[in-house]
Image: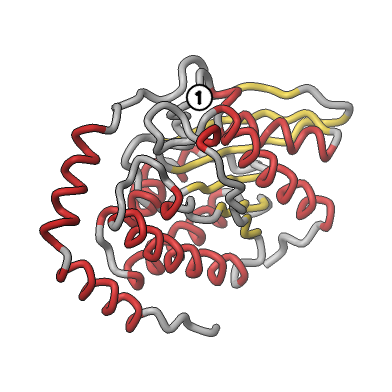
Amino acid sequence: MKRVKDSSGYALWLAALLSGLPLFAWQAHRLRRDTPRLEGAAGPTRGRIRGRASALALHAVGESTVAGVGAPDHAHALAGRCAAALASRSGRAVHWQAHGHNGATARDVRYRYVPEIAHDAAVVVIALGVNDVLSGCAPETWRYNLRKLLASTRRRAPGAVIALSAVPPMGHFPAIPQPLRAMLGVRAHAFDRIISIEAAACPQAVYVPIPFEGGTDYFCDDRFHPSPLGYERWGALIGEAAALRLQSGSTSA
């Protein structure tokens, strides 16, 4: 499998980070201090979307977006929106569950949430990356943890389509001040490139990019997490991509 030549890019990023470390550290401190700490979505972490045919099981695993931060309830957060789009596109009922928490990394999800995925799940949505970007882990560590997560998910739900979301476009997050925003945006883009390549190498996976359309209405009050509109648009992309892969039947190893 072709490998990404990201080590030199990481070295440049690290050098730039170190050169601007006092400013970035001050901005990161203010970001943590000033960003409102919102709770995850209220209500049940599971639900059902009606359909004309037999039900599919969808499980979403990941970080605060899967926990629904910025949405009033999980039906209007990522898992519920993915399920609604999947049901609309496939014509089938969808039983969905959300498994996520604030601060989750790829390694956290592998150990904590993959065991909660149903063996007969038809779709597994994975939404990660922001916390791995913020943690300062190297690209090779991210790649390793991502591969392990995909392998664990395949063993847990061998017949599932794995809808692997792109890393959110941190270079557009209004809450992050410049130049820290630009620095994190470059790093998120590099991590996203790794996701796209690992998804292409996994027979069950489909990579779902996030085309950013701009506008603060895509963000909730903390200007960091999606708003209900942001979740609706994001979930539609993931649900439709999963439905297309299910229809093609291309999930075999």
Q: Is residue 97 above or below residue 163?
A: above
**Image point 33% across, 83% down: which residue?**
8
Q: Is residue 67 left or right of residue 155?
A: left
Task: Give the percent coordinates (x, y) of residue 55.
Answer: 77, 31
Task: Give the percent coordinates (x, y) of residue 206.
Answer: 65, 59
Quadrant of the rendering where the N terminus is positioned: bottom right
- From this viewpoint, which residue is outermost toward the top? 43
**Image point 62% across, 29% down: which residue?**
80
Task: Between residue 54 and residue 83, name the one nearer to us.
Answer: 83
Q: How is the image coloured?
A: secondary structure
Q: Is residue 155 above or below residue 72?
A: below
Task: Between residue 36 and residue 55, name the one nearer to us.
Answer: 36
**Image point 46% across, 22% down: which residue?**
41
Task: Give the percent coordinates (x, y) of residue 167.
Answer: 48, 55
Q: Secondary structure at mark 1?
A: loop
Quadrant of the rendering where the C terminus is positioned: bottom right
**Image point 42% across, 45% down: which residue?**
173
Instruction: Give the residue number, with chain letter if any, for mark 1.
Output: 71
Task: Give the percent coordinates (x, y) of residue 164.
Answer: 57, 54
- From this viewpoint, which residue is outermost toward the left? 22
Q: Is residue 71 above or below residue 249?
A: above
The crowd level at tag 1 (other Cα within 10 Å; few <14, some 14-19, many 20+) is: many
Q: Is residue 86 above or below residue 244?
A: above
Q: Is residue 214 left or right of residue 87?
A: left
Task: Between residue 72 and residue 162, name the one nearer to us.
Answer: 72
**Residue type, label 1:** Ala
**Tag count:** 1
